[in-house]
Amino acid sequence: MKKVIINAISAAMMISIVSYCNLISGNKYVGAVLFAFGLIVVCRYSMSLFTGMAGYINKKNALEFVAVTAVNSVFAFGFGVLGSFNPAVREKAVEVCAARLANNLLWLFVSAIFCGILIYLGVDFYKKTGNYIGIIFSIPVFVLCGFDHTVADLFYYGASGIYKAEDFIVLPVLIAGNLVGSNIIRGLLYAGRKEKT
């Protein structure tokens, strides 16, 4: 479990760094490339990222998944608070979070589903082939579309400083959406294959 926690902290830090760069660059295309790089690093060094694990939950790794989700969430938010000390980052994070919190919970859930689908496709392609091409394309799609990634969003909330206790209702909604999206696409991809075997 110690190794899992360390890998979860590492993943949260990596996603926080690219989230910080995304805010400071002010360019969504640069941000899209940076996020792809972030997930490549997470996959290459076997870091533990909630969204990367969401489509692979089973009885054996359920406790590990819960631990990773908690550690990713706490540390991404904490790294966001550190990022808020940069006024330029804080200002941009306020804009991003205000726009997200203005959405209703149903859209946040749907948005997180779409993100989960794209993350799963990128990660699974890498797991099956060792090739990063799936990540290189799927991650920029979710960034450019503005879909909600739980860990990145927590960094933004931490960096913004505008959050209130009641705003954290979005957290279980985002987690559920990312989970549902990952497992929907996994089911669709492999249902036909299972029927044939």
Image (cartoon, rainbow, N blue to C red):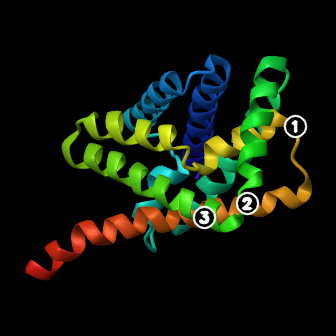
Q: Quadrant of the image for the C terminus?
A: bottom left
Q: Which mark is residue 109?
A: 3
Q: Is residue 169 visible?
A: yes
Task: Using residue 157 as the reference point, say whether residue 115 is left or right of it.
Answer: left
- Residue 175, how many percent across, how many down? 61, 61
Type of residue at label 2?
Val
First in sequence, mark 2 or 3: give its number.
Answer: 3
x and y percentages locating residue 111 in the rendered image: 55, 57
Secondary structure category for the residue under label 3: helix
Looking at the rendered structure, the kind of residue marked 1 is Gly
Q: Earlier in the sequence, mark 1 or mark 2?
A: 1
Task: Residue 172: give x, y in percent of width and height.
Answer: 69, 65
Residues 106 and 60: in front is 106
Q: Is residue 25 above or below residue 172?
A: above
Element at label 1: loop
At 57% across and 31% down in the image, what residue appears?
14
Q: CA distance from mark 2 to mark 3?
A: 9 Å
Tell which of 32 and 79 is nearer to you: 32
Residue at 30% x, 51% y: name it. 124
Q: Report the residue marked by disc 1.
A: 161
Give the spatial CA distance, label 1 vs label 2.
Answer: 16 Å
Instruction: Provide the residue designation for mark 2.
Output: 170
